[in-house]
Image (cartoon, rainbow, N blue to C red):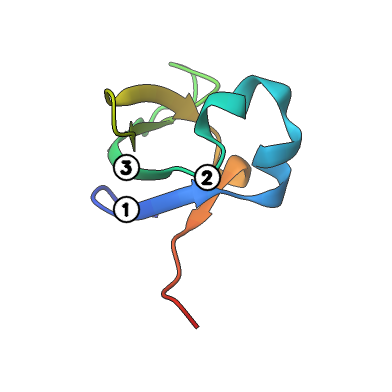
Amino acid sequence: MQVGELVELSSAGRKIKQNSQCYGLIGLIVRIEKDGNITNHPIKIEWIVPVANLHYPMKRYEIKKVRGIK
């Protein structure tokens, strides 16, 4: 994953009750912390919602890349 990619919750991320604010949303990766000692959630994501943008840190397994419409 790289900064600037669009992401959504993975199935593992949807199972976590703390991520309920992000269900069905698309997010943009704004920063990735390289040092694992700084934080347990190194990927900073700006979730795009109609009312306001939400900023939540996530682990890699909680998100996946947004795929195009099939």
Q: Residues within 10 Å of mark 2 (few under 14, many from 20)?
A: few
Q: Is residue 18 above or below residue 8?
A: above
Q: Quadrant of the N terminus?
A: bottom left
Residue denoted by label 3 = 29
Distance between mark 2 and mark 1 Cα atoms = 21 Å
The residue under label 1 is which amino acid type? Gln
Q: Which residue is at 48% across, 18% downward?
A: 39
Point out residue 49 in the picture as x, y percentages from the top left corner.
Answer: 33, 34
Give x and y (percent) for residue 69: 44, 77
Q: Amino acid at mark 3?
A: Ile
Vertical position of residue 30 compared to residue 67: above or below: above
Name the amino acid type tagged 2.
Gly
> What residue is shown at x 34% (from left), y 54% (from top)?
6
Write the residue at 57% across / 38% down: 23
Task: Depth check: give the residue in front, 25 or 18.
Answer: 25
- How far apart marks 3 and 2 lie (CA) works out to 16 Å
Marks 1 and 3 sit apart, C-alpha to C-alpha, by 7 Å
Q: Secondary structure at mark 1?
A: loop
